[in-house]
Image: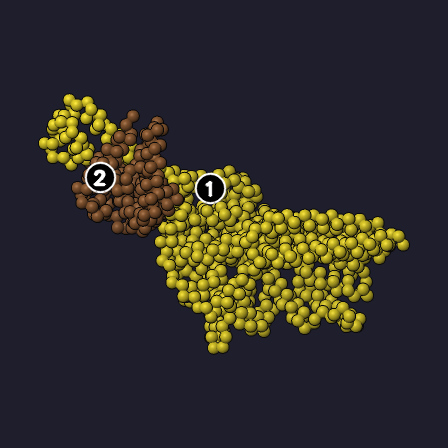
Chain colours: A yellow, B brown
């Protein structure tokens, strides 16, 4: 063999496709030919390097691939949107979402009020129980914001570990957590955990229920469903203030067992509203790593239905993934309101109705109110409307067969059913029978609502007699309601407003009501309106009445500071633009404070004390200036796609500030004039 | 035949186990497989498509397609071989879609590279090799990558590219010769 022949066969040689005799001849040639040996080495080197052609892309492509494979996992539903009802459903959705945000905000405030004053100790007790069981330190980081080391560890270990170190069956009670519903025994315990002292105010009773569920969870080998129930309550949204210590505990569990899906799920759940992006990341990881674990899918479907994270296609994918794993579960009812695709919605609602028909555990029966709302919200008319009403009546009969009493959660659900079908009489009668805090509170509000409807506020130019009659009647209804519900500062506030308007009652009566509002507020009464403060309104009323003037600046500052603290301590990150929401809520509070300051200026002017009035005006001007700066900063940082609602709110805020500036200038002129006179 | 793919792989056992888990629906296991092979798949995409964003896009499509087709992988060959074959098929499909514009770009790039290579030889043989492969005539380049990188036989390449096996073999020989010349110290 010569070199030319060798080179012509060299490819077959390295590819091992030569006949044995040819190969032998080539090998013989190699022994004697340096040049061909180098040629062969060169080719082998080329092939070896070809094998190392690996080149990493500049960015991680996995997130897109993961999204793609997830999409391929869940079959797509053909979209056959019925355009006829789209507008109606969407309008309801928008209203509902706005309402939901407001309700959520109120809930958080209510929770804050309670937890600030009552909950740290019992929650800590429950938390200690959890820690003791695990044999870990007694104080992982209670009340504080836990560092995320454990979670990072979880994610990193998940990325770097090989299959050899990956447990085939995850540790803990994972098998139970993969079930679609708790066992009958655990279900009974969950119901038991929700039964609390009914004399407690609404939010406090919810918190006590949460504590009881924790205790039950610990007593029952850290049962997953008990832990889950204690975190979720009604809306799959844990109350942030409630879970600070608990978050720290779940976090310590994850740090101990970074791969455990159950503790990771509970830890992530407790971050809902506090660190929602982190929660989403953890839940997505869980959903990807543990395809048989249904619950991360449900919570992801929930969060993708909320304003700040709204993405209906993602919500639907995760919801479908959940329904694939748990076809008989009625749980999706909690979040269906976020969906706008009417054909998907009506199919799923129908399916949920049949799921509910076979359920008889309390927690499932409570879901009926979601079903009724969803069926009713499509705004059906005529025959369809009567059918819906009839169906709800049948459901109510079924529920009443489970609940002969008038108190408790199921009773509240039954009441909401009567409300849904506009049977106001039955609704009111049921409220009257309910002697729990919630029942009495609801009955009082209902009475007040009816009274307001029948007694419209007389116009400012109405005759004095008409005005007096109105306020006398209002004073009577407030007294009557206070008799039934003395612990509600709102009812005392109505009494105060009436007394302030009447002027012919002894001042002692006003002072007694004022001190009751103050005592109830300082004792941590449940605030019932978002962005309002009973203390600020009290300050304003006292100034108008001309009493306790020296104490009013301190009262304004206390009211403002308390409400501000409550807001910042419990701010949630579920809105599209949390900074703007925070500014709006601060502004609304400040409007009340501003009103109180102006009442004080007027009072001092009436009393001929212009220096004091000037002092109060200084406070107003300083705050006005601060808000103008904040507003212009917000305007400068506004994103072009922030939406029409924020745009309108900003416009309204600008107009209000301009009016307040005018009012302030007029008051300043009056102060100067009084001083001159 | 030299099997360069073997050099890229972790232990067979690990890969087999990951494939089993992924077939059972584990995204995590499939992510591990992605981490093991993405560099190589992306490398092939880059060499054939010579465009970073296109290569990223096709790499994503390959892995999504691999996930969807995973049930059809019966374990008779190594997963890596199966994946690389699937990759080359998808890249070829992509080339059909891209058509002549890409060819013109490649020609331009090839001219630039040839100039660079002759005047500024790099010390890094792997970088040179990538550039050298990019500078190959299109058909020779694809055949080289399919045969020596993705492990296709001449018959398979011939069928995929509508050529005779002899032409295929000749083109591979030509590609190897050019590359050896370019890479000679």
Q: Nearer the viewer, residue A246 or A37?
A: A37
> Residue under mark 2: which chain is it in?
B
Crowd tier of the residue under label 2, counting other residues whose Cα lies within 10 Å: few below 14, some 14–19, many 20 or above = some
Answer above or below: position of A31 versus B144: above
Q: Percent position (x, y) of residue A613?
A: 81, 52
Q: Secondary structure at mark 1?
A: helix
In this view, the residue farthest toward the left is A21
Residue A588, which numbered label? Answer: none
- Residue A677 quadrant: bottom right
In this view, the residue farthest toward the right is A677
Which residue carries the number 2 mark?
B171
Which residue carries the number 1 mark?
A151
Q: Nearer the viewer, residue A434 or B72?
A: B72
> Is the residue at mark 2 from the same chain as the one at mark 1?
no
> Residue under mark 1: which chain is it in?
A
Q: Quadrant of the N terminus of chain A?
A: top left
Q: How far is mark 2 from mark 1, CA to CA?
A: 53 Å
> From where the camera sits, is residue A210 visible?
no
Q: Percent position (x, y) of residue A448?
A: 66, 67
User: How many marks can you see?
Assistant: 2
> From where the camera sits, is residue A479 visible?
yes
Crowd tier of the residue under label 1, counting other residues whose Cα lies within 10 Å: few below 14, some 14–19, many 20 or above = many
- Is residue A24 found left or right of B124 in the rendered image? left
Q: Percent position (x, y) of residue B179?
A: 27, 33
Answer above or below: position of A418 versus A645: below
Q: Residue at x 84, y 49 (%)?
A: A611
Q: Nearer the viewer, residue A6 or A603?
A: A6
Q: Percent position (x, y) of residue A116?
A: 62, 49
């Amino acid at each position: 063999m010569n070199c030319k022949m060798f080179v012509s066969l060299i490819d077959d040689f390295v590819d091992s496709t030569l006949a044995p005799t040819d190969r032998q001849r080539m090998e013989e040639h190699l022994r004697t030919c340096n040049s061909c040996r180098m040629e062969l080495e060169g080719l082998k080197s080329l092939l070896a390097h070809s094998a190392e052609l690996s080149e990493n892309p500049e960015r991680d492509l996995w997130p897109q691939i993961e999204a793609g494979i997830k999409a391929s996992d869940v079959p797509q539903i053909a979209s056959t949107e019925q355009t006829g009802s789209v507008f109606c459903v969407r309008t309801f959705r928008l209203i509902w979402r706005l309402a939901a945000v407001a309700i959520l905000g109120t809930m958080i405030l209510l929770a804050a009020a309670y937890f600030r004053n009552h909950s740290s100790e019992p929650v800590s007790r429950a938390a200690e129980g959890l820690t003791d069981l695990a044999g870990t330190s007694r104080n992982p980081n209670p009340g504080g914001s836990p560092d995320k080391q454990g979670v990072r560890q979880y994610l990193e270990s998940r990325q770097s570990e090989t299959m050899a170190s990956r447990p085939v069956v995850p540790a803990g009670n994972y098998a139970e957590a993969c079930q679609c519903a708790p066992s009958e025994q655990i279900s009974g315990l969950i119901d038991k955990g929700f039964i609390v002292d009914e004399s407690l105010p609404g939010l406090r009773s919810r918190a006590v229920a949460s504590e009881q569920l924790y205790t039950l969870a610990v007593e029952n080998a850290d049962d997953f469903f008990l832990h889950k129930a204690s975190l979720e309550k009604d809306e799959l949204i844990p109350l942030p203030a409630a879970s600070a210590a608990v978050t720290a505990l779940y976090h310590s569990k994850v740090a101990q067992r970074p791969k455990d899906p159950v503790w990771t799920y509970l830890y992530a759940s407790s971050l809902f509203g506090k660190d929602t992006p982190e929660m989403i990341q953890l839940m997505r990881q869980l959903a990807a790593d543990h395809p048989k674990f249904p619950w991360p899918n449900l919570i992801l479907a929930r969060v993708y239905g909320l304003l700040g994270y709204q993405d209906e296609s993602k919500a639907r994918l995760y919801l479908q993934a959940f329904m694939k794993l748990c076809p008989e579960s009625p749980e999706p009812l909690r979040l269906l309101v976020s969906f706008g695709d009417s054909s998907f919605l009506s199919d799923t609602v129908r399916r949920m109705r049949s799921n509910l028909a076979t359920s008889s555990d309390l927690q499932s029966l409570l879901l009926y109110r979601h079903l009724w709302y969803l069926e009713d919200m499509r705004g059906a008319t005529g025959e369809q409307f009567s059918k819906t009403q009839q169906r709800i009546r049948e459901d109510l009969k079924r529920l009443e067969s489970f609940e002969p009493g008038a108190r408790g959660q199921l009773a509240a659900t039954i009441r909401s059913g009567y409300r849904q079908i506009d049977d106001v009489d039955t609704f009111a009668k049921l409220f009257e029978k309910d002697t729990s805090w919630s029942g009495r509170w609801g009955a009082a509000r209902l009475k007040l609502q009816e009274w307001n409807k029948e007694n419209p506020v007389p116009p400012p130019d109405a005759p004095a007699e008409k005005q007096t009659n109105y306020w006398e009647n209002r004073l009577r209804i407030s007294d009557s309601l206070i008799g039934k519900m003395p612990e509600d500062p709102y009812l005392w506030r109505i009494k105060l407003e009436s007394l302030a308007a009447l002027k012919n009652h002894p001042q002692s009566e006003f002072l007694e009501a004022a001190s009751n509002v103050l005592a109830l507020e300082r004792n941590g009464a449940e605030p019932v309106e978002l962005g309002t403060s009973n203390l600020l309104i009290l300050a304003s009323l006292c100034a108008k009445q001309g009493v306790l003037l020296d104490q009013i600046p301190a009262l304004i500052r206390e009211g403002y500071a308390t409400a501000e603290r409550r807001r910042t301590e419990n701010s949630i990150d579920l809105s599209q633009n949390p900074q703007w929401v925070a500014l709006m809520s601060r502004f609304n509070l400040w409007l009340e404070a501003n009103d109180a300051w102006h009442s004080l200026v007027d009072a001092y002017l009436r009393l001929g004390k212009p220096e004091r009035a000037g002092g109060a005006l200084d406070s107003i001007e300083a705050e006005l200036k601060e808000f103008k700066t904040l507003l212009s900063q917000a305007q400068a940082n506004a994103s072009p796609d922030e939406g029409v609602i924020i745009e309108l709110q900003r416009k309204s805020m600008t107009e209000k500030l301009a009016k307040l500036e005018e009012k302030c200038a007029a008051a300043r002129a009056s102060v100067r004039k009084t001083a001159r006179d | 035949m030299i099997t360069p793919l073997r050099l890229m792989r972790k232990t067979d056992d690990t890969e087999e186990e990951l494939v089993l888990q992924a077939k059972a629906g584990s995204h995590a296991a499939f992510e591990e497989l992605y981490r093991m092979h993405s560099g190589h798949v992306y490398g092939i995409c880059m060499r054939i498509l010579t465009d970073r964003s296109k290569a990223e896009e096709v790499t994503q499509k390959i892995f999504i397609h691999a996930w969807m087709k995973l049930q059809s992988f019966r374990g008779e060959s190594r997963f890596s071989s199966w994946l690389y074959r699937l990759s080359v098929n998808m890249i070829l499909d992509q080339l059909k879609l891209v058509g002549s514009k890409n060819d013109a770009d490649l020609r331009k790039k090839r001219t630039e590279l040839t100039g660079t290579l002759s005047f500024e030889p790099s010390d890094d043989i792997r970088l040179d090799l990538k550039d050298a492969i990019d500078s190959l005539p299109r058909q020779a380049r694809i055949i080289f990558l399919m045969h020596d990188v993705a492990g296709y036989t001449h018959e398979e390449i011939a069928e995929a590219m509508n050529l005779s096996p002899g032409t295929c073999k000749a083109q591979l020989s030509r590609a190897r010769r050019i590359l050896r010349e370019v890479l000679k110290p």
